[in-house]
Image (cartoon, helix red, strand yellow):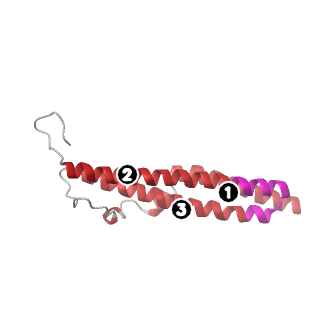
Amino acid sequence: MSTNNPGSPSISQEEIKHLEFIQAIVARLGNGSFLIKGWTMTVAGVFFGVSLNSLSWKIATAGIIPIIGFWLLDAYFLRQERLFRKLYDDVRRPAVTVELFSMNVQPYHAVVPWRKVIWSHTMVNFYGSLALVDIAFIVGGILRNH
């Protein structure tokens, strides 16, 4: 990067623009992830409310489906964000050659595996907590009906 140090490598305007494009994608992915979490809370809250009101384990069981679906969708967004962050890191380094304006994240797929993203602390804490609450509603509904 360009700094005031005379011996440091400089970065071209095109490379700066490339970094800005990648940064914009990361920001959009982060915003998408935020929106998914909001929708998850809304949908899960509806299922929790209806389950609590009717004490139906069937409704509570149906509520686990959107939680899992949103978990996977959010994991997709998080993985894409991490892939673009890897691309960003390589574009900013003078020693690594990345084609100018390339948005190809394929080379980073092995470095950011699905399993690590799905089971990351962020995902497990948020979606796992909702799943546990839903499971509690399922068990409560089953126990009440027996």
Residue 9 on the magenta segment: no
**CB atoms at circles 1 and 3 under 8 Å apart?**
no
- The percent coordinates of residue 34 (x first, y second) are 53, 50
Give the structural element (helix, strand or loop) at label 2.
Answer: helix
Q: First in sequence, mark 2 or 1: give its number.
A: 2
Task: Give the main secondary structure, helix, strand or loop, of the magenta stretch.
Answer: helix
> In the rendered structure, does residue 50 fall within the stretch colored magenta?
yes
The residue shown at (72%, 65%) is: 62
Please identify, in this view, whether the residue under mark 2 or under mark 3 is nearer the observer.
Answer: 2
x, y percentage for residue 28? 44, 53
Q: CA distance from mark 2 to mark 1?
A: 29 Å
Q: Secondary structure at mark 1?
A: helix
Dot 2 or dot 3, earlier in sequence: 2
- How many other residues sit within 10 Å of disc 3, few (<14), some (14-19) or many (≥20)? some
Q: Which mark is residue 43?
A: 1
Mark 1 Cα within 10 Å, few/some/many (few <14, many 20+)? some
- Locate the N terminus by quadrant: top left
User: Does residue 13 appear in this view?
Assistant: yes
Q: What's the magenta region?
A: 43-61
Could you say where residue 125 lies in the image, as x and y percent from the top left? Answer: 58, 49
Give amino acid for label 1: Val
Looking at the image, the residue that sits furthest to the top is 4
Residue ID for mark 3: 73
Secondary structure of residue under mark 3 = helix
The residue shown at (35%, 50%) is 23
